[in-house]
Amino acid sequence: MIQKNIFIRVDSGSDVGLGHVMRCFAIAESINTMNFNVYFISKKIRGNIIKRIENDGYKVFHLNSKVLKSSKLDWKMDALETTKIIQRFKNEKNLLLVDNYELSKMWEMSLKSVVDKIIIIDDFSNRSHNCNLFIDQNLHTGKIDRNKKYSKNCKKLLGPKYALLRNEFAENRKNVKNRSGKINRILISFGGSDEKNQTLISLKAIKKLAEEKINVDVIVGEPNKNKTKIKKICSSMENLTYYQQPKNIAKIMKRADLAIGAGGIITWERCCLGLPSIVSIVSKNQEDMVNAVARKGCLINLGKAERLTSEDYLNAIKNLNPGKLVHMQKKCMKLVDGKGAERVAKQISLIAKR
């Protein structure tokens, strides 16, 4: 019987964040049940979570030995090294999944000779692709023409129906409480690296709410440069709880009444669990998506993070009312059901048979 392999080319680190790996994790979990061998191919970038990938039982092929400061790369060299890895499995059925903003059509075409099918995850809309399956889980406002991004014959999986969430979110969704609209617990999470330092800024707003006895869970990623300072602040206030790269993030998220955070994949995690949120845009590729989700009534959009102060976060919290929060929960639950990764895995299995 011919072995079926899926190679996942994805990076993580301080400048690129952890979201790319997290959504690839979601596919890996689902595709693992369909008799595929899953392999990750990654560069060692400062702040990476390669060790976590390996601890979860996946083989990781490293494209470099020395840890790099940046995710910027030479696509030709990257393609050559990736090709060498996949060629070791030349008599097997090989699929390639790519989630990397640095790679595009030319890189993909250079890999065609060593793989049977190419699957692309891309929500940035800034480059073209040559692939068999294209995934963009984001909502868009209509300003972006996604048809320019991929070859005519590829199958497209578009929108939050295909939101790539790990199994823990679908499981925790099953017993999500109907929130009353009263804010007793807030979750603060700005992704893995929080390059715009929004965790510390939003914590200043929380300090001003101290008299209201609100419990706050603060989640930071390993690449966060300010994690020591954040941990110290959390230790100084009895209503704050600090978490670094927790494995049970869905469980923590589920018990919150309100979230403060960034756009990106965490938006779909919050929606899946019906969690209303106050959101700042921390990178250019989040802007269109956050605007679109705000129009659906699922979040409060504060705009670009670099323009925000603690007063902006404080006012946003104070301007919420119970009716608004209850309405947001319903909108969130309707938008994302937690089965996106399962749907994508089934489509990958189908194209592997062709």
Image: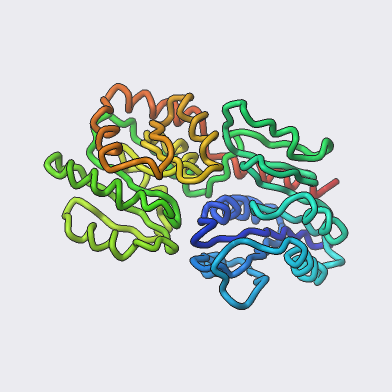
Find residue 4 and report its horizontal and vertical position in percent. 77, 59
Find residue 215 and report its horizontal and vertical position in percent. 22, 46
| Observer able to see residue 56 | no
Does 339 sit above or below residue 13?
above
Residue 16, picture quadrant: bottom right
Q: Nearer the viewer, residue 335 or 219?
A: 219
Q: Residue at x 49, y 27 (%)?
A: 334
Q: Is residue 202 left or right of residue 64?
A: left
Q: Residue at x 66, y 55 (%)?
A: 102
Q: Nearer the viewer, residue 231 or 159?
A: 231
Q: Nearer the viewer, residue 187 or 353?
A: 187
Find residue 284 and report its horizontal and vertical position in percent. 53, 43
Q: Residue at x 38, y 31 (%)?
A: 300
The image's colouring method is rainbow
Q: Extreme bottom residue here?
A: 65
Which quadrant holds the N terminus? bottom right
- How many marks on residues? 0
Residue 297, picture quadrant: top left
Q: Residue at x 50, y 44 (%)?
A: 264
Does 324 sit above or below residue 346?
above
Find residue 44 and report its horizontal and vertical position in percent. 58, 70
Q: Extreme left residue here?
A: 211
Q: Nearer the viewer, residue 75 or 112?
A: 75
Residue 225, picture quadrant: bottom left
Q: Extreme front residue here?
A: 307
| Observer able to see residue 253 | yes
Q: Is residue 30 left or right of residue 354?
A: left
